[in-house]
Image (cartoon, helix red, strand yellow):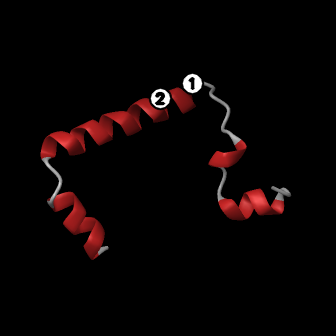
Amino acid sequence: MLQARASVENTPFERLMELAEEGAAESRLRGIGATPKFEDLPEDLRRSLGG
């Protein structure tokens, strides 16, 4: 948690906003019917499905 906090504190605000927009855009794409890829599933779930 401390490393994450330090990383955020040391990242310029403009870059944080870019990252937030990228994440929001990806969420919107997934929310409009994009099917998740097998690689996007959590590792333990992939293993249980035989991958």
Q: Kindly indicate whether the residue at mark 1 contacts the one at mark 2 (C-beta within 8 angstroms).
A: yes
Q: Image check: 44 left or right of 7?
A: right
**Which image quarter holds the C terminus?**
bottom right
Label 2 element class: helix
- Residue beneath disc 2: 28
Mark 1 Cα within 10 Å, few/some/many (few <14, many 20+)? Answer: few
Q: Position of residue 28 (x, y in %)?
A: 47, 29
Q: Image check: 9 left or right of 28?
A: left
**Which image quarter holds the N terminus?**
bottom left
- Cα distance in 3D space between marks 2 and 1: 6 Å
Quick check: 8 above or below 26?
below
- Residue beneath disc 1: 32
Q: Amino acid at mark 2?
A: Arg
Q: Residue at x 14, y 45 (%)?
A: 13
Quick check: 50 above or below 20?
below
Work out which residue is located at the far top of the displayed protein and give it.
Answer: 32
Work out which residue is located at the far right of the displayed protein and give it.
Answer: 50
Quarter of the figure with residue 25: top left
